[in-house]
Amino acid sequence: MAETEVKEDIEYKNPLGVTTDEDGPDDFVRVCVVLPGLKKKTLRNAAKNARIEFKGEERSFVLDVFMTGEGKNKDTETVYRYKIQQLPDEIEPENCYHKIKEGQVVLYLKKVKSRSWARELDEGGLETYEDPEENQESD
């Protein structure tokens, strides 16, 4: 996977790391997306220095995090993208939600069927999206 992806004049960075498990509520898959520098508002499930956008579909999702800089860099914005193109099974996008932790966005994906995704998650995690144009060699 490439470290950055450029679309529509935005340079997307990949998260520092991602873990997945089924340790959350029943019929949910928990996806922990590590984003260095993400700050949580005290006593609220909101980011202090970022805007979170989640777009879920039946078998895929995109998480975009627009993080603002601090101090001298407060006018800069870093955009992280985590894009999954093929989930092991269908989700209910309208029932998915996220929580903010220091340095993390934790997604809770509501599964349509209550079957376990443990085998797929152990074998290779979630299938991330890679732009085919990024894989072409330039002359």
Image (spheres, rainbow, N blue to C red):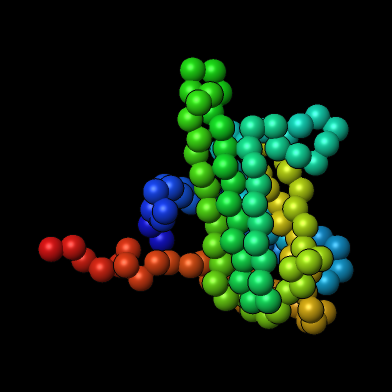
- In the figure, is residue 2 to the left or right of 119? left
As drawn, the residue found furthest toward the front would be 8
Q: Residue at x 73, y 74 (%)?
A: 91
Tell which of 116 and 53 is nearer to you: 53
Q: Quadrant of residue 96?
A: bottom right
Q: Quadrant of the C terminus?
A: bottom left
Q: Residue at x 67, y 66 (%)?
A: 56
Judge whether 81 appears above or below 128 on screen. Answer: above
The number of discs equals 0
Percent position of residue 39, x then y: 67, 33
As drawn, the residue found furthest toward the left would be 139
Percent position of residue 40, x then y: 73, 34
Q: Residue at x 59, y 46 (%)?
A: 65
Residue 123 visible in image: no
Tell which of 101 and 58 is nearer to you: 58
Q: Quadrant of residue 55?
A: bottom right
- In the figure, is residue 133 to the left or right of 76? left
- In the figure, is residue 13 to the left or right of 29? left
Judge whether 88 appears above or below 54 on screen. Answer: below
Percent position of residue 51, x then y: 64, 42
Q: Quadrant of the N terminus?
A: bottom left
Judge whether 79 appears above or below 92 on screen. Answer: above
Tell which of 138 and 118 is nearer to you: 138
Q: Residue at x 55, y 57 (%)?
A: 82
Tell which of 1 and 90 is nearer to you: 90
Residue 83 visible in image: yes
